[in-house]
Image (cartoon, rainbow, N blue to C red):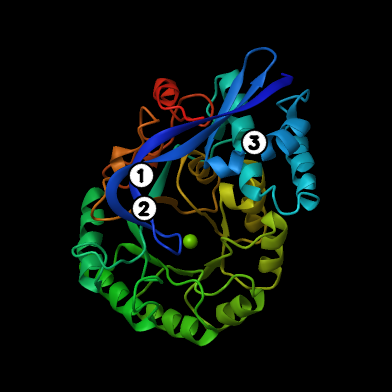
Amino acid sequence: MIITDVSVRTFRTKTKRHSDSAGHGHPGPAHKVAQSLLTVTTEDGHEGHAFAAPQVVRPHLIDKYVKKVLIGQDARDRERLWHDLAHWQRGSAAQLTDRTLAIVDCALWDLAGRALNQPVHKLIGAYRDKVPAYGSTMCGDELEGGLATPDDYGRFAQKLVARGYKGIKLHTWMPPVSWAPDVKADLRACAAVREAVGPDIALMIDAFHWYSRLDALALGRGLEKLGFAWIEEPMDEQSMSSYAWLAGALDIPVLGPETAAGKFWARAEWVKAGAVDILRTGVHDVGGITPALKTMRMAECFGMDCEVHGNGAANLIVAAASRNCRWYERGLLHPFLEYDDGHDYLKTLADPMDEDGFVHLSDRPGLGEEIDFDHIENNRVA
Ligand code: MG
């Protein structure tokens, strides 16, 4: 299965998500944005695909790094190809990121699954075929009837429970919301949600990511009284010592790191430092399915859970192939959006959820996405 080509198709897709000045998504009018599909092809005609933001697979990266590593190599040698690409990062002047590594790794897994006619979670060795999902809200906003007040969060949480979710994670208010951040407002939203859904729904928070140690401590203490399941990334993750300090001071589990650089190596250091109670990984944060599984297994060696960041087929596969992970993160969700509408470039949802809150893995070969290649061709951009 010698790789003969790596190509990228960029196309337009319709979305109602808009980014604010800090990069957080919020609902708005439908508009079109660019999306890319990376395809790896072998000499015997097998293909593997993975979706990416266009800048993650821009020509400079594909031509200078990805093609040089992949072309002429055996597509089944994922471990070696991953390391060869990761070694290029050092000399790439920060151009070659973990995101690009992740997309390439996902495409190679997809190729293996399609070639063998097996879903990837079965190739890895599945732990389960369905994973409980928590509903992950968008960040707070100032939209009337949106996520502007604690009561808005409470009402939306009731809708999510009615839809089937057994867990909910709040992203609360962050700049550029005019008055944010505010620990007391975060706690009011969390209290409103607990009041709205009762004691049996798991609740988590992912608040402002740059609180001070003392603000994070106050937030955590308040959440302990509300019976929250974890506190996620309340401080800058570049200070691991601050997390060790916080995890030592709080009873509520501290979860992380999510955005910190360093893949599984850095996450091992966090475990060693006692900086977290629940570890975090994510296919697009640590460089692919291959390193996400290493992170997951490393946590298992220490008797720790490791929760997967982000939605989509690849993250769902990592959760399904692991025992020490409770949830799949489904979202981001907002009262003005219908998540189950999916994407116009996929014929079916990658993460269909039943009325009991379980997301079911696909039986389709590869990553399991049912790609609408006609849509992609009909909406190509140069
Ligand atoms: Mg997060």
Amino acid type, residue under disc 2 in the picture: His
Name the foreground residue: 354 vs 188.
188
Q: Which mark is residue 18?
A: 2
Specify whether tag 1 is near ligand 1 (CB below 8 Å): no
Amino acid type, residue under disc 3 in the picture: Pro
**Label whose residue precedes the other's in the sequence (2 or 1):** 2
Circles 3 and 1, Cβ within 8 Å, touching? The answer is no
Q: Name the residue located 69 percent from the left edge and 73 percent from the top edge.
A: 273
Q: CA distance from mark 3 to mark 1?
A: 39 Å
Specify whether tag 3 is near ligand 1 (CB below 8 Å): no
Q: Quadrant of residue 8?
A: top right
Left or right: 354 as drawn, with respect to 245: left
Q: Secondary structure at mark 3?
A: helix
Quadrant containing the N terminus is top right
Find the residue positioned furthest to the front. Answer: 382
Residue bearing the label numbered 3: 59
